[in-house]
Image (cartoon, rainbow, N blue to C red):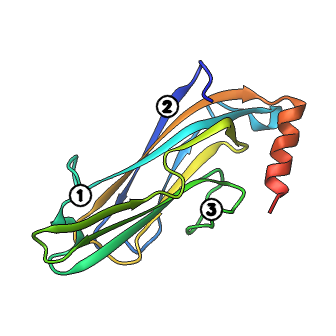
């Protein structure tokens, strides 16, 4: 459950149409709020991810493809910098999201399905970020016709870890 002293952090990844199959990333630097070596860390209470087309508008058929096609975008948020998508079982994965859009002819949207493996995410005790940043990434198996914007929103608070919370963190980091 979120504490009363929460604040919000945001990130956005622009996934260009021509290079959507590359792993696109951004990092939220939280070092101004934390000092992990002294036990002051950031804790994620909730996290959300949304998708828009090239601009503030929703994704439209032309963003997918001009002809019959389906496209997918996979995103993640982690407490460590990554070079590609990781398994949701990774002990530093805050959450992952898979989204599938499909168009049959470029003029009508026949399917727009958002498969949510952990979105929105809400933690009862919070997800401890034991580093000085939150890493977000997005990757598409095939290029989209239009650019995508992947938007992340995190509700967070800072916490100085007690001995009990340090033990919980150590168990979670060594569980895999």
Total residue callouts: 3
Q: Tell me the CA gap for discs 2 and 1.
A: 25 Å
Q: Which numbered marker is on residue 59? A: 1
**First in sequence: mark 3 vs mark 2:** 2
Of badges 3 and 2, the one in the foreground is 3
Q: Is residue 20 above or below residue 127?
A: below
Name the outermost residue toward the left. Answer: 107
Front one among 128 and 17 = 128
Q: Which residue is mark 3?
A: 88
Q: In the image, 153: left or right of 67? A: right
Position of residue 121 measured from the top left corner of the image (x, y, whole percent): 55, 45
- Residue under the image location 52 percent in, 42 percent down: 47
Q: Residues within 10 Å of mark 3 (few under 14, many from 20)?
A: some
Expressed as whole percent of the image width and height from the top left, the position of residue 137 reads 49, 59
The reply to whether discs 3 and 2 touch (Cβ–Cβ < 8 Å) is: no
Front residue of 98/39: it is 98
Q: Which mark is residue 8?
A: 2
Task: Decide: is 145 above or below 36.
Answer: below
Residue drawn at (65%, 50%) of the image: 79
The answer to whether residue 86 is seen in the rendering is: yes
Q: Residue furthest bottom?
A: 68
As drawn, 157 above or below 176: above
Q: Is residue 86 above or below residue 50?
A: below
Query: Which numbered tag is attached to residue 11?
Result: none
Quadrant including the C terminus? bottom right
């Amino acid at each position: 459950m979120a504490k009363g002293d929460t604040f919000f952090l945001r990130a956005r990844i622009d996934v260009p149409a021509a290079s959507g199959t590359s792993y696109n990333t951004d990092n939220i630097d939280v070092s101004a709020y934390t000092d992990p070596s002294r036990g002051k860390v950031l804790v994620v209470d909730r996290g959300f991810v949304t998708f828009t087309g090239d601009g503030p508008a929703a994704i439209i058929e032309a963003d997918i493809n001009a002809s019959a096609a389906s496209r997918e975008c996979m995103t993640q948020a982690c407490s460590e910098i990554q070079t590609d998508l990781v398994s949701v079982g990774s002990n530093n994965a805050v959450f992952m999201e898979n989204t599938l859009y499909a168009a049959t002819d470029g003029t009508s949207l026949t399917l727009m399905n958002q498969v949510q493996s952990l979105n929105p995410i809400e933690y009862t005790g919070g997800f401890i970020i034991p580093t000085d940043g939150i890493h977000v990434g997005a990757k598409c198996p095939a290029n989209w016709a239009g650019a995508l914007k992947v938007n992340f929103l995190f509700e967070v608070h800072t916490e100085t870890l007690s001995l009990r919370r340090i033990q919980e963190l150590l168990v979670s980091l060594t569980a895999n």
